[in-house]
Amino acid sequence: MDVKRPAHKNRRRMRLAAYATLCVLAVALITYGLSRLKPAAPSVERGVIVTDTVKRGQMLLQVHGMGTLVPEEVRQIAAPVEGRVEQIFVKAGTEVSAGTVLVELGNPTIRQQAVDVEYQVKSAEADLNNLRARLDSDRMAQQAATAQVESEYNQAKIQLDTDEQLGKEGLVPLLTLRISRVRVQQLANRLEIEKKRVLTAKQSADAQVAAQQTHIEQLRAQLRLNQENVASLQVRAGTNGVLQEVTVVVGQQITPGTNIARVADPSSLKAALQIPETQIKDIALGQSATVDTRSGGGSVV
């Protein structure tokens, strides 16, 4: 059978639906209103506010930072040649000059190469002396041969003059006169050839001596290079300053270019400061700076 529902239940449901609709509408209106509002100004405490009159002029902005004094000139001492560290003469913190020996390296190959080339130079110089002596002997022999031919030529020419004078008087046969003339011509040709030989021999001797001298100069250049390599086994500071660090140990095998030590010039220092990242944007080249070293003890690095 049919049961009649109470009317108050229907009214309750309608009220709930109306309340929900009103809530949704209110949230939408509030959201829209808040989106139209401008951001509120930041709030600060009244005690930190300073009231003053605005003035036109320069505004002083100071940036502070902690730091250390560091040398402007630092020289890295590198190994010029390969070798094994045999001895370290100076410790870090010692004042050094340009000629101060810091480290001594050992390399038997470099020393032996210098000795070998030195003997080669001496041998080449001895060969040059022997060459000059032999060439002088050959030159003197050639000059003697030329003088002999010239003497024969002069004698033949005198004989020809005599034969021609006697031939005019009919005292010398025509055949004898012809023979004298042929002999003079032959000796003249020989004398010219001998003189050319002397000139050619001189040019050849000069060329041989020059070639040997060039060879000696090449060996001497190689010897100087090897001697410089031997001298480089003693690694020097190369500049005046303070030895900051020695980066090798005795017995270590190093190659050319390996950093051995670091020398700094303490007479020229600069301040290396640590500025917060939020303030670094306010720093530019050319701005004035003041370094205060009264805050406490420190060290030069």
Image (spheres, helix red, strand yellow):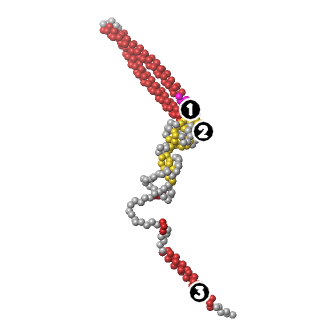
For label 1, the crowd category at 10 Å Cα-Cα, with few meaning under 14, some 14 to 19 and many 20 or more, is: some
**CA–CA distance in space, label 2 to label 3:** 99 Å
**SS under mark 2:** loop
Query: Where 188 falls versus 17 (above or below)?
Result: above
Residue 300 visible at all: yes
User: Picture quarter containing residue 60?
Assistant: bottom left
Rendered residue at 42%/24% (across/down): 203
Decide whether residue 279 is among the magenta residues: no
Q: Position of residue 196 (x, y in %)?
A: 40, 21
Q: Label for residue 250?
A: 2
**Residue furthest right as drawn:** 1
The amino acid marked with disc number 3 is: Met
The amino acid marked with disc number 2 is: Val
Which stretch did the figure color magenta? Answer: 107-118
In depth, the one of 72 and 148 nearer the eye is 72
- Tell me the mark number nearer the camera, choosing from 2 and 3: 2
For label 3, the crowd category at 10 Å Cα-Cα, with few meaning under 14, some 14 to 19 and many 20 or more, is: few
In depth, the one of 228 and 149 nearer the eye is 228
